[in-house]
Image (cartoon, rainbow, N blue to C red):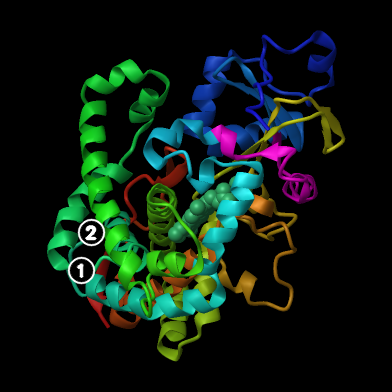
């Protein structure tokens, strides 16, 4: 199926406009700005004013976005046939960076085929095989933290999750190669909306900063293609993600390169941010810190995982996920036309007192009690056919990183106030960088 045209002001007839869920009348540009920079306050206000299902308008073309905040409505979307709810076509701006074979960009049969090829590298058995390597890298990173001096945990977590991608996902172990790749990767992952403009206006690519970005990308690609070529002869018996992919499927070089860049961009900043929030909460709450330290000492992995899960609930890194409707379909009691964008507002569900009593409180025990959150209420990784393929991988990373850090240190928060979030591309990051101070236990 081809690209679905956006439903926007130019394609919307009066009759359809009247049947849409209610929403603000603000100019599209203002709504786009509120959504892009202040979604965490904009969405709750819109829900309070217009109800559980509301419509906002965003650029380009004043496109119609229907926002859902109830689990039962979101379940309708995640449970719909993927052919009716496209996710890939909303990510076209990423094509020059991730490549046209990227899992994130595909829909329909291409998506099903690519996902099937990737799955073996993210199975339970595969994840168990990565855990030892992740713990080793986490211990090495933790040993470098400055004792007694405040530092920004978000940056430390970025360094660590990048190292995990390089060594555990790409399987690079040669020290010289790692030294070359680190600064290049750092530039690749700091892709900004300005860089993405280059996808829509190719004439920009001759100028800085686009030219510089493309130069970096070429250097990275050269190394990735070299790694892929070498690994084709040496993957047997190795336990990194690239080797497992080679062992499990038939891949062209370019398909593999596109998935590696996708895993880097989808898995690096997201996991680093989730962990930065987790450490921020532990550092400001001595009782939760003690709970985490006891869990780390005792090897109680479900308790460590509960800390990561609660951080993802209270501070969802990805606040909403989108789908584009490819044919007229009924959702949440509304008839939605082809081309409508639907947003599942993860952040609204996670802060709803109906599903999470005292939703503002950080309480990992929610995930350990006899009465855990109902299905469909904890959705930081989206859902359905597009649910994050790295969900298990990032929970495993979180568990190992907490183990390494909490067995080594006590944590304090130089500023114990809750830290406000700040929008950074699709993620919500801690505005002050999640500053902590550590002392040896
Ligand atoms: C805490 C960390 C992470 C969060 C919060 C997160 C969140 C998400 C979300 C919300 C989606 C979209 C789901 C949907 O549309 O329903 C997604 C997709 C994806 N994520 Fe993650 N993610 C994380 C870590 C990772 C990691 C570690 C990897 C890989 C190593 C990864 C790879 C991907 C890929 C490839 C997709 C696209 C799946 C598809 O379209 O079929 N993510 N992620």
For the residues bearing labels 1 and 2, Cβ distance under 8 angstroms: yes
Q: Position of residue 292 (x, y in %)?
A: 45, 78
Q: Is residue 82 magenta?
A: yes
- Number of other residues with Cα within 10 Å of mark 2, as a class: few under 14, some 14 to 19, many 20 or more: some
Quadrant (top left/top right/bottom left/bottom right) for the C terminus:
bottom left
Q: Secondary structure at mark 1?
A: loop
Q: Which residue is mark 1?
A: 145
Position in image of residue 129 (x %, y %): 44, 79
> Which of the labelled discs sits on residue 90, or is there none?
none
Which residues make up the magenta segment? 67-90
Cβ of mark 2 under 8 Å from ligand 1: the answer is no
- Residue 317 spot, x, y in % from top left: 49, 50
In depth, the one of 29 and 114 nearer the eye is 114
Outermost residue on the left side: it is: 176
Q: Which residue is mark 2?
A: 151
Going 50% across and 81% down the picture, which residue do you hit? 301
Element type where label 2 sits in the image? strand
Q: Is residue 171 above or below residue 125?
A: above
Q: Residue 31: percent from the left, percent from the top?
A: 57, 21
Q: Residue 89 in magenta?
A: yes
């Amino acid at each position: 199926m081809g690209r679905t045209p956006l439903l926007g002001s130019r394609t919307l007839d009066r009759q359809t406009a009247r049947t849409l869920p209610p929403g603000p009348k603000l100019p599209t540009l203002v709504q786009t700005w509120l959504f892009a920079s202040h979604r965490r306050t904009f969405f709750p206000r819109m829900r309070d004013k217009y109800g559980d299902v509301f419509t906002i308008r965003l650029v380009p073309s004043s496109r119609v976005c229907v926002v859902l905040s109830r689990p039962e409505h979101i379940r309708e979307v995640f449970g719909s046939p993927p052919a009716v709810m496209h996710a890939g076509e909303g990510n076209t701006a990423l094509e020059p960076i991730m490549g046209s074979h990227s899992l994130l960009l595909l829909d329909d049969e291409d998506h099903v085929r690519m996902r099937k090829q990737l799955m073996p590298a993210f199975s339970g058995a595969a994840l168990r095989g990565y855990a030892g390597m992740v713990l080793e890298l986490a211990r090495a990173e933790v040993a470098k933290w400055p004792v007694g001096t405040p530092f920004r945990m978000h940056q430390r977590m970025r360094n660590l999750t990048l190292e995990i991608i390089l060594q555990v996902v790409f399987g690079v172990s040669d020290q010289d190669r790692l030294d070359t790749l680190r600064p290049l990767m750092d530039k690749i992952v700091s892709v900004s909306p300005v860089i993405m403009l280059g996808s829509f206006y190719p004439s920009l690519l001759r100028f800085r900063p686009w030219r510089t970005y493309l130069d970096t990308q070429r250097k990275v690609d050269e190394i990735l293609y070299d790694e892929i070529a070498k690994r084709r002869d040496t993957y047997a018996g190795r336990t990194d993600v690239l080797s497992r992919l080679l062992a499990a499927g038939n891949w062209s070089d370019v398909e593999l390169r596109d998935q590696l860049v996708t895993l880097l961009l989808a898995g690096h900043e997201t996991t680093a941010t989730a962990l930065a929030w987790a450490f921020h909460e532990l550092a400001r709450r001595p009782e939760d810190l003690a709970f985490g330290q006891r869990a780390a000492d005792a090897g109680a992995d479900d308790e460590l995982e509960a800390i990561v899960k609660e951080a993802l609930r209270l501070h969802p890194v990805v606040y909403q996920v989108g789908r584009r409707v490819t044919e007229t379909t009924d959702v949440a009691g509304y008839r939605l036309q082809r081309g409508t964008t639907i947003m599942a507002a993860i952040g609204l569900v996670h802060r709803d007192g109906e599903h999470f009593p005292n939703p503002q409180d950080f309480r990992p025990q929610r995930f350990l009690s006899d009465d855990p959150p109902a299905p469909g209420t904890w959705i930081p990784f989206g859902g359905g056919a597009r649910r994050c393929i790295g969900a298990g991988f990032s929970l495993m990373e979180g568990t190992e990183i907490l183990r390494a850090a909490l067995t080594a240190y006590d944590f304090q928060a130089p500023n114990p106030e809750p830290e406000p979030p700040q929008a950074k591309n699709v993620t919500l990051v801690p505005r002050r960088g999640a500053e902590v101070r550590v002392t040896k236990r």
